[in-house]
Image: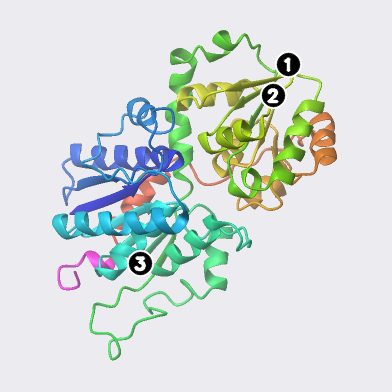
Amino acid sequence: MKIATVIGARPQFIKAAAVSRAIAAHNRSGASPAIEEILVHTGQHYDDGMSAVFFRELEIPEPQYHLNVGSGSHGCQTGRMLAAIEEVLLREKPDWVLIYGDTNSTLAGALTAAKLHIPVAHVEAGLRSFNRRMPEEINRVVADQLAQLLLCPSQVAVDNLAAEGIGKNEGQSPFFSEKKCPVPVFPPKVVITGDVMANALQFAAARASTQSDILTRLGLRPQGYLLATVHRAENTDNSDRLSNILSAFAALDEPLVFPVHPRTRKVLQASGYHPPNSVKLIDPVGYFDIIALEKSARLLLTDSGGMQKEAYWLKVPCITLRDETEWVETVQNGWNILVGADRDRIVAAVRAFMPPPAHPPLYGDGRAAVHSLKALLNHPLNQEDVL
């Protein structure tokens, strides 16, 4: 079996690493069928701090294809990806295309595969913010509509898909029928696997304790600082929201470490932003370093979906700088609070937010990568008379 994995952004490298390790373990075991994974890196995140360091640390094989798409408007970036991915898929003829999350790389991989009649497996399917102004929401909705295998982190994700008519009647395609469509019918199948980022976190946390010295380098003591990240377009491209967030950071009376995403740094430089002494801007760091920083922070402030989950698993309180979240379970269990970009709410939450003592497990048993691979191998489309 040949699987083409399409990735392009930092969160996808983390997720794909877990599944790639599961594929390697499957092949080492001698189980059938042997799996050939073709890694396709679109280049959506392309500098060392956002890309290459993750391949090194997470022991991801070097991509067979690096498309070097780079940055650009959504239309330009996605269009270039479509053309480049199509060339790869026509050359490699994979049995499946594997996509992750909600980026433009995800959208391009799903669209290209669908037009070439190649089955799509979507890891992290079913997430919804219900905010169609977010480009990520559009990407994930389209990807889920095109996928034949939807690998969900939770029952909430399954319920979201069911509300859209996906997976309600497995074996029935919502778009194709034998009479109307001459290409094979790919019935959507929905499976709860848990979250593959839990696998990645286990891997990184075990190494961060010995391979990261970032607290020493930055002169930090455990529980003696806050950690913040801001990168989503809804915050970086809205001057009022970003100004409110930065004003809140300045009003806090404790050290705040702020690894700055390249897009955010560009906006800060253009605005002439000068941080107060309490706010320490640093370049993006590798996965081991960011996990070390998260694990020892008193509290996290972020608009990142991945960091909301990592904070929960690490039992660190999280304040989310958004008006909604896909990871609603973290909020429902009291370890995450939504404050948007309201300066006063941010400051008040940092000073007063205390999570409850209860901390129920979320998003699976930590073996989501193995469960995902098993679901793919057992999919009925792998029968010879279908593919």
Circle 3: is it few (<14), some (14-19), or many (20+) Cα within 10 Å? many
Disc number placed over residue 277 in the picture, else none: 1
Residue name at image x 44 percent, y 49 percent: 72
Residue 107 drawn at (x, y percent): 41, 59
Which kind of residue does numbered mark 2 sit on? His
Q: Taking the image as drawn, is residue 315 in sight?
A: yes
SS label for mark 3: loop
SS label for mark 2: loop
Residue 17 drawn at (x, y percent): 35, 37
Residue name at image x 84 percent, y 32 percent: 352
In magenta segment, residue 124: no
Please report the bounds of the magenta region as a residue range. Answer: 380-387
Q: Toward the viewer: 133 or 182?
A: 133
Which kind of residue does numbered mark 1 sit on? Asn
- Tell me the mark number nearer the camera, choosing from 2 and 3: 2
Label 2 to label 1, Cα distance in Å?
Answer: 9 Å
